[in-house]
């Protein structure tokens, strides 16, 4: 690839004697030739390469220089009086400079033209150049006297795989200034002119230090190397960097190497389980699908894979995450401070950033655990330009079902598998295109006659275009589809099949513009939804089931946003964003109109209205304001404030404690209003103990409107008029999250404590719409105290140990308070919702990871992970339930995982 | 049904993890006692009963607090008021010679007690088709996978069909009666035991092309109990209920199915059709049902594999020599007497039901009983 338009001129001071200039003979008639074509010919004829800025040579035409056949003489003649100078660096690199001459240290200036008299370096913060040090010069030294700060920017890539490195720290110790690279590996810093020492660091990568002499705005692209055995060289000190510099309050980044070290429950490292270690994130209990962020329900998390929403985030009833960890580069969880480019969910955004695949060589890994097997392969199709990543995972858990002494279970089966494929094309600096696909499938068969099938797929195409290095865009088209099919043939006459699906197609255009002290992000997003709420069919001809189908829901959601990250001074930066979203519910749809004087029910129907196809029958819209401010309180601490406003038009209807396998997605419609949320948050961050330990404290207060709850005992499966059972609920949540963390070194640990509450209140006015007499009550996932401790100990280069401990308050439950009989049927009467709690939860997990070899060039690198889940074997109460025994109602606690569960998994990289 | 299967599946997954269950005291902080009104008006030529009671707190026997001294009346659509008589305490009955429900008739209940008045709206008596068939199938229960110790049981099903299509929501209850024989030489050896259903059996046929109920499982009778040892009989009664009543029962069933996993429906009280006229905020429990009734009886006299549990637990001790006069018939009973042996030999039990069948049932042979 030719490097024609060098923005950066490189001056290298080498103490070693410069290579003698070769006499490159030009044996053709160059007279009247355009300089550019001359260069092409010269490069073709000799093993040389030219470096220059295109603008300098645009109109230069070679003249006739009689007798001159040697390149050097020709260039001397050509550039005479043109204020352009040339220098041959090493052998064959011809570097052109404008306005100044390159000279070697200690060499007397020769030839014509001016050179920049010594010292060549502006005073700055960099160390004194000693012999042998490489100094990178950015910008034209001739501009050294122009006053003002300059901007340094560039891309950080992984040298081995050429993937962008997001979240790397760029730090200038002398200025106490730094930043982190964004999702494209791009970084930008405004610094004074002069010499500086810039340090690039990232977890699991070798730190790189660059001596810099900057005169003007310029670009410095860095390739970082993986640390092959991270255990040895992981001595990167996280300078008061990531947390102190980062803009948003409540943003957590989980790096794949760190979550791979975590203990596992069934020998599988799992992304959702690692998210649960983050303060402010909890779950209702083991085996519950989804997670709760700062008092939000599980359907309020936007899980993005390949830029598309993932509607079902788990396999096997919540025991596994739906996304194979092999494809993950890193995961960012926005608990608050949600950037303007994300919307559509109330509580959080979990952005799964997939790996791009190795651009340079074929690589892969495979592994087995007690229940799953997985593989991944990746590599270039065309080196550095076209490359792929393919991963798959499957279960073979049926042997467990066979092993259990139960006929019904022996006749059952359970399986899941998922597949990820990605192909990326990187033809040059201007464009990058990738195509990604995800497919996951779950199937359970219970006692040979009832089957559950879940299918989840995503296809996505993304085109990133770089107009300039300061202005780039990303255009994404994606489709996400989720479907379940439940069927039963247990009673032939009642054999049925039930289908629910949601299909969304989205188009998103996003632009990033860096201008002065501003960093603009703007764009627009359009999503089209099609939901099949329920389609109930006879399974075969002998079935008497009457086909029934709830009318489909169709809608379009559109949004635009503009956000500016503005650096006011070194000590204050602001982020202001506005997102405006609109939701159109589309016909055809038949809507019942109810008497507003009474609770919605069959008897209060007053009228029926039919809306035609493609007509908009309901529209909701509103602004979403996203604001934050970052005050640096010194070199080691900062204070951040944040306000966040979110809207949600898509709801997962659930009247069970956790998301159930039969829960359906529903769009906002005539009656179901969009959920809205506001969050106020503040955070304090401090680096203590010589940059080794990070401390953060965040507080938040959140208000949520139009949450959904349901009237008692409602069946939501094939419910044609959900609005009749709907109860409108308001929510508030608040909490404080404290975290102490030592993220680097041989011993890494973290201690997080959260105190948080989430309370709900019904807003209805009719008797059956009122819960707990309209008073505030705890949500099912209101667990005030939560303590999470983690420890990673790198014992040796081959062995590492890790442990994590979790303590949390028991979740709230509703108990019956009194019971009565109708005939001989005993019925419980429940009083206030969630006014009791099950006992607290406490669990310790341990795991040991042993790498089989240290040889980096061995064909396959094996490693073993042995882990124990619930080491104490504590009988954590999972739930409380009530049974009638001899005419008396008695309460029981149910515990699962009441014994330590060991597991062993084997993986190898090749 | 869908939810139930999911629960079963979930439960098994949990059981893989060797979960365990322990009883606990919920320590309920409130001590609510609410009025319970329940009863039914049928088209049968018999007394109709309305029962009034107070609900009981968790951990105490249910349904023991009778409410007496109430004035209970039934009004039909023509405005004819029938006053019920209290007999026995807490139960209010109609006079079968005066009052009988009619199909198509509409009835409302009114209760006056403790200075307050409670009422229901008018409820229509819907017609109900006869039960087409009531039958059983043998079911094998394998306790342990590789064991030869197989037990059997009977699953009882009901088929029903309303050609008129008027009855869309069915409800059933049943009365089980079985002959019970103590397998020892005792005086009261043969008795009949009667038990009533305590499960909610409802079916919505509105999703089917015909108002047809096929193979609706009424109950499962295990041979572990002593029901199937001699002769077993079940009387199934079929009711036609309104959509409102069906929803009430279905919701109660949804909530009562909760087994302690995360897919349990959020427990909530289900409001019946009785309200307090004086205080709309007062919670009144129970349901006033109005329904036509049809019924069918099934006898099971068959052999099932496996042994009832009671056979193995009766004998507590054996005694040789002279039978002591004291102590027996208070805590100990003689169940076998080999008095012609020398020395005499007795088998003793501490369980009175092993010595006297009338502790569980009656010695009076039911009038409907058939001999096999």
Image (spheres, coloured by chain):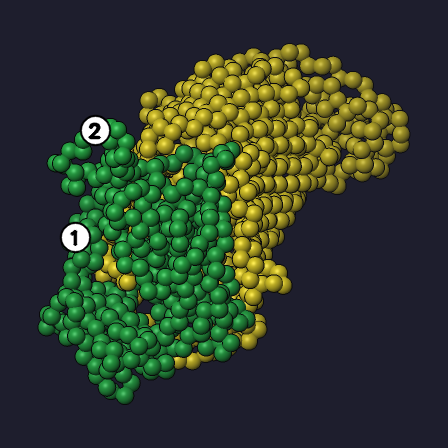
- The residue carrying mark 1 is B30
Q: Position of residue B247 (x, y in %)?
A: 37, 66
Write the residue at 65% across / 37% down.
A390
Residue A267: image tag? none
Q: Say left or right for A759 vs A112.
A: left
Along the line of sight, which residue is nearer the eye, A855 or B45?
A: B45
- Hue used for the chain lettered A: yellow
Please give the letter of the chain rendered in green.
Answer: B
Q: Position of residue A494 (x, y in %)?
A: 53, 61
Write the residue at 60% across / 24% down.
A908
Q: Neighbour class for label 1 at 10 Å: few (<14), some, many (≥20)?
A: few
Q: Where is residue A643 in the image (x, y as percent from the top left)?
A: 35, 50
Provide the secondary structure element on which disc 2 rests: loop
Real-space Cα separation, disc 2 to disc 1, in angstroms: 58 Å
Q: Position of residue A738 (x, y in %)?
A: 31, 35
Can residue A806 be seen by looking at this rendering?
A: yes
Along the line of sight, which residue is nearer the eye, B68 or A583?
A: B68
Give the quarter of the image for residue A546.
Answer: bottom right
- The residue carrying mark 2 is B321
Give the quarter of the image for residue A224.
Answer: top right
């Amino acid at each position: 690839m030719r490097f024609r338009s060098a923005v950066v001129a490189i001056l290298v001071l080498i103490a070693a004697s410069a290579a003698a200039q070769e006499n490159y003979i030009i044996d053709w008639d160059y007279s009247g030739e355009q300089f550019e074509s001359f260069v092409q010919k010269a490069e073709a004829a000799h093993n040389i390469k030219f470096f220059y800025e295109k603008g300098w040579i645009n109109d230069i035409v070679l003249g006739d220089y009689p007798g001159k056949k040697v390149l050097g003489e020709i260039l001397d003649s050509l550039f005479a009086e043109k204020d352009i100078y040339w220098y041959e660096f090493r052998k064959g690199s011809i570097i052109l400079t404008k306005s100044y001459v390159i000279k070697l240290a200690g060499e007397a200036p020769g030839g014509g033209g001016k050179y920049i008299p010594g010292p060549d370096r502006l005073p700055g913060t960099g160390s004194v150049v000693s012999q042998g040090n490489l100094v990178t010069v950015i910008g034209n030294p001739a501009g050294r006297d122009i006053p003002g700060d300059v901007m340094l920017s560039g891309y950080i890539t992984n040298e081995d795989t050429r993937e962008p490195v997001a979240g790397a720290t760029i730090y200038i110790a002398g200025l106490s200034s730094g930043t982190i690279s964004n999702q494209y590996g791009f970084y930008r810093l405004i610094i004074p002119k002069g010499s500086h020492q810039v340090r690039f660091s990232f977890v699991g990568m070798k730190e790189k230090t660059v001596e810099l002499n900057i005169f003007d705005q310029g670009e410095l692209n860095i390739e970082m190397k993986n640390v092959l055995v991270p255990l040895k060289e992981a001595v990167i000190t996280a300078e008061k960097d990531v947390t102190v510099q980062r803009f948003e309050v409540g943003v957590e980044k989980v790096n794949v190497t760190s979550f791979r070290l975590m203990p596992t429950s069934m020998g599988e490292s799992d992304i959702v389980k690692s998210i649960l270690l983050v303060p402010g994130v909890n779950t209702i209990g083991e085996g519950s699908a989804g997670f709760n962020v700062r008092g939000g329900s599980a359907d309020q998390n936007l899980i993005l894979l390949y830029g598309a929403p993932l509607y079902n985030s788990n396999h096997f009833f919540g025991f596994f995450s739906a996304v194979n960890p092999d494809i993950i580069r890193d995961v960012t969880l926005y608990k608050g401070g949600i950037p303007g480019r994300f919307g559509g969910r109330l509580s959080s955004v979990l952005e799964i950033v997939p790996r791009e695949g190795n651009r340079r060589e074929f690589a892969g890994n495979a592994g087995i655990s007690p229940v799953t097997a997985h593989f991944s392969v990746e590599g270039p199709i065309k080196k550095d330009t076209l490359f792929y990543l393919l991963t798959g995972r499957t279960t073979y858990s049926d042997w467990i079902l066979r092993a259990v002494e139960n006929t019904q279970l022996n006749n059952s089966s359970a399986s899941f598998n998922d597949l990820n494929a990605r192909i990326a094309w990187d033809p040059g600096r201007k464009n990058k295109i990738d195509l990604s696909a995800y497919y996951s499938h779950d199937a359970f068969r219970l006692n040979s006659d009832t089957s559950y099938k879940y299918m989840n797929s995503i296809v996505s195409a993304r085109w990133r275009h770089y107009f300039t290095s300061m202005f780039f865009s990303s255009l994404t088209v994606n489709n996400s589809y989720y479907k379940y099919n439940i069927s039963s043939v247990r009673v032939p006459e009642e054999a049925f099949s039930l289908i629910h699906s949601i299909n969304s197609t989205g188009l998103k255009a996003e632009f990033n513009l860096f201008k002065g002290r501003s960093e603009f992000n703007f764009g627009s997003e359009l999503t089209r939804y099609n939901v099949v709420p329920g389609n109930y069919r006879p399974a075969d001809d002998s079935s008497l089931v009457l086909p029934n189908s709830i009318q489909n829901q169709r809608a379009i959601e559109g949004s635009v946003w503009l956000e500016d990250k503005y650096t006011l001074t070194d000590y204050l930066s602001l982020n202001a964003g506005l997102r405006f979203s609109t939701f159109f519910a589309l016909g055809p749809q038949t809507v019942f109109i109810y008497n507003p004087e009474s609770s919605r029910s069959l008897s209060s129907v007053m009228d029926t209205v039919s809306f035609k196809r493609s007509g908009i029958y309901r529209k909701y819209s509103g602004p979403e304001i996203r604001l934050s401010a970052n005050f640096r309180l010194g070199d080691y601490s900062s204070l951040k404030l944040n306000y966040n406003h979110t809207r949600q038009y898509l709801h997962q209807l659930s009247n069970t404690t956790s998301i159930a396998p039969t829960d359906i997605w529903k769009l906002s419609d005539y009656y179901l209003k969009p959920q809205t949320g506001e969050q106020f948050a503040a955070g304090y961050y401090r680096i203590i103990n010589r940059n080794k330990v990070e401390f953060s404290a965040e507080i938040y207060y959140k208000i949520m409107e139009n949450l959904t709850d349901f009237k008692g005992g409602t069946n939501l499966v094939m419910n044609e008029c959900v609005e009749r059972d709907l109860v409108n609920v308001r929510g508030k949540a608040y909490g404080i999250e404290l975290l102490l963390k030592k993220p680097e070194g041989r011993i890494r640990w973290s201690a997080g404590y959260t105190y948080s509450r989430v309370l709900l209140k019904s807003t209805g006015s009719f008797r059956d719409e009122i819960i707990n007499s309209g008073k505030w009550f705890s949500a099912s996932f209101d667990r005030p105290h939560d303590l999470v401790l983690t420890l990673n100990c790198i014992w040796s280069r081959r062995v590492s140990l890790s442990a994590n401990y979790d303590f949390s308050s028991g979740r709230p439950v509703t108990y019956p308070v009194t019971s009565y009989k109708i005939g001989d049927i005993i019925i419980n009467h429940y009083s206030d919702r969630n006014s009791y709690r099950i006992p607290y939860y406490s669990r310790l997990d341990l795991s040991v990871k042993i790498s089989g070899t240290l040889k980096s060039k061995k064909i396959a690198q094996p490693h073993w992970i042995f882990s124990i889940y619930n080491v104490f074997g504590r009988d954590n109460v999972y739930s409380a339930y009530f049974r009638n025994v001899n005419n008396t109602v008695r309460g029981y606690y149910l515990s699962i995982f009441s014994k330590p569960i060991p597991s062993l998994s084997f993986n190898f990289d090749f | 049904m869908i939810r139930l299967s999911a629960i079963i599946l979930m439960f098994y997954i949990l059981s893989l993890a060797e979960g365990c269950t322990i009883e606990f005291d919920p320590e309920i902080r409130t001590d609510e006692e609410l009025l319970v009104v329940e009863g039914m008006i049928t088209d049968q030529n018999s007394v109709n009963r309305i029962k009034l009671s107070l609900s009981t707190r968790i951990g105490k026997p249910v349904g023991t607090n009778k409410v007496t001294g109430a004035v209970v009346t039934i009004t039909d659509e023509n405005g004819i008021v029938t006053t019920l008589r209290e007999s026995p305490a807490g139960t209010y009955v109609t006079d079968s010679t005066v009052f009988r429900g009619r199909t198509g008739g509409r009835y409302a209940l009114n209760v006056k007690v403790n200075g307050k008045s409670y009422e229901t709206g008018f409820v229509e008596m819907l017609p109900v088709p006869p039960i087409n068939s009531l039958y059983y199938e043998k079911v094998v229960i394998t306790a342990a996978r590789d064991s030869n110790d197989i037990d059997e049981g009977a699953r009882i099903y009901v088929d029903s069909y309303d050609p008129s299509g008027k009855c869309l929501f069915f409800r059933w209850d049943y009365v089980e009666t079985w002959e019970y024989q103590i397998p020892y030489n005792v005086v009261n050896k043969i008795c009949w035991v009667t038990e009533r259903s305590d499960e909610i059996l409802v079916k919505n046929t509105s999703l089917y092309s015909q108002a047809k109920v096929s193979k609706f499982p009424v109950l499962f009778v295990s041979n572990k109990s002593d029901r199937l040892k001699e002769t077993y009989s079940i009387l199934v009664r079929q009711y036609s209920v309104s959509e409102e009543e069906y929803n009430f029962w279905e919701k109660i069933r949804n909530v009562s199915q909760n087994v302690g996993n995360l897919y349990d429906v959020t427990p909530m009280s289900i409001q019946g059709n009785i309200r307090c006229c004086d205080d709309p905020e007062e919670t009144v429990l129970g349901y006033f049902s109005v329904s036509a009734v049809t019924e069918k009886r099934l006898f099971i006299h068959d052999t099932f594999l496996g042994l009832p549990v009671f056979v193995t637990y009766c004998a507590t001790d054996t005694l040789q020599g002279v039978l002591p006069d004291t102590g027996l018939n208070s805590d100990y009973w003689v169940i076998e007497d080999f008095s012609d042996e020398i020395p005499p030999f007795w088998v003793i039990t501490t369980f009175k039901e092993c010595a006297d069948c009338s502790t569980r049932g009656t010695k009076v042979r039911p009038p409907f009983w058939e001999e096999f």
